[in-house]
Image (cartoon, rainbow, N blue to C red):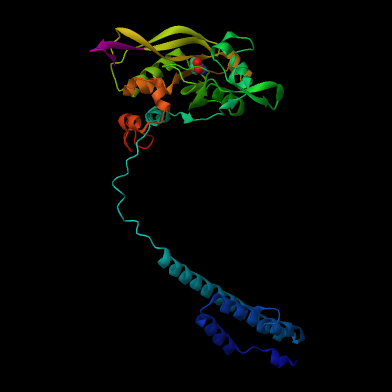
Amino acid sequence: MSSSSSVLDPRALESLLQNIKETQTLSGLDDIRISILGKKGLLTEHMKTLGALSPDEKRTQGAFLNSFKSKIEEALESQKKLLETLALEDSLKEVWEDITLPIRPSISGKVHPLTQAKEEVLSFFTKKGFSLEEGPEIETSDYNFSDLNIPKHHPARQMHDTFYLKARNPQNPEEALLLRTHTSNVQIRQFKTKKPPFRFVSIGPVYRSDYDNTHTPMFHQIELVALEKGLNMGHLKGLLTEFLKFFFDLPELEIRLRPSFFPFTEPSAEVDIGYSHKDGKIVLGKAENWLEILGCGMIHPNVISNCGLDPSEIGGFAFGMGLERIAMLKYGIPDLRSFFEGDLRWLNHYGFSWGTSPSLFGSVVP
Ligand code: PHE
């Protein structure tokens, strides 16, 4: 091939660019790309002839071929984008849907009272800087008992009426796994895997082998935990008082802390709220009588050290209560078992409409 035949006519570029612009299919574009840039393509063939040119010619012809190449590539790319956009627009024409259609007015699902109560509790504590944490319902006896300062043969293990499973603890095959009897396992799991300070709530199912009008084998607990420097019973009482008045929507609700015992808190207390009788009904507020509502206390130093933290450095408080119990009291639901019967008439009566405040998304907490 003579040196002059390697010179590509600049006008060829114009007509190739024009071809690209007129191509209407992606496969057509691909054919053009191969005919110019492919192994045997026009440009590739010309590149091969550069070696035979004089250094000066090589420089100018090389630069020309390079800019030729990038112009072709650009044109191919922009035509490809254009064709793809047109194809997308075409397909959208077919799958178009009218999202402005009104919803069916007959949608009438109800929010279960437990869901409502959970959202009300969370709307308060999340505003106070507590996160929501979860733990497993199938648990080892270490997380459910031992780490919470309830050693083997401690009577509290019997008091919890534990359901043991056939499955064994993979770390200790001697030992059966169990259904957690309380949400306090979440404390241990959090303390062992994260760094203080801690502020969290956990809400979820717990299991105890018990069944009558005030006990079901599965129910829900809410546990609140704070672990950081400088906390005392005063903080616990203040937070509980504010929470209970908010939850029951009773600024005058009377509250008392009564000394009690839990292996995982020291000191421990049970919290009672005041009520009186009116026309055969319980009215919360003024304390003619007291109703026990939750257990609480300062987290036991043994629990803190069991989790590898230093109880002389850090301390905190926790409380645990039954979600069904506070929902029954607030919404006037007489029978615990009815929560789980799935009776639609019951749900229609006690359920809530969607969007009823407060919820996590529209809260009435100041
Ligand atoms: N875990 C206790 C129970 O289920 C409740 C509780 C939690 C008490 C936290 C004190 C502190 O009985």
Quadrant of the rendering where the N terminus is positioned:
bottom right
Quadrant of the rendering where the C terminus is positioned:
top left
Name the residue at 34% across, 59% down. Answer: 98
Q: Residue 126, percent across and down?
A: 42, 30
Q: Nearer the viewer, residue 153 or 312?
A: 153
Give the image quarter of residue 234.
top left
Name the residue at 59% across, 75% down. Answer: 73
Name the residue at 32% across, 44% down. Answer: 107
Give the image quarter of residue 112.
top left
Residue 307 in view (yes/no) = no
Q: Residue 43, percent across and down?
A: 66, 82
Name the residue at 52% across, 25% down. Answer: 198
Side of 46 where 309 appears, left or right:
left
Q: Seen from this angle, which residue lies furthest right?
A: 52
Q: From what the image shows, is residue 238 above or below residue 351?
A: above
Residue 73 in view (yes/no) = yes
Magenta: main secondary structure equals: strand
Q: Residue 143, percent across and down?
A: 61, 22
Q: From what the image shows, is residue 190 above or below residue 29?
A: above
How many numbered callouts? 0
Give the image quarter of residue 241.
top left
Q: From what the image shows, is residue 298 above or below residue 62?
A: above
Q: Seen from this angle, which residue lies furthest left?
A: 279
Residue 296 covered by magenta stretch: no
Residue 277 covered by magenta stretch: yes
Q: Which region is colored magenta?
A: 273-284
Q: Residue 41, percent across and down?
A: 67, 82
Q: Nearer the viewer, residue 242 or 85?
A: 85
Side of 7 where 351 appears, left or right:
left
Q: Nearer the viewer, residue 75 or 289?
A: 289
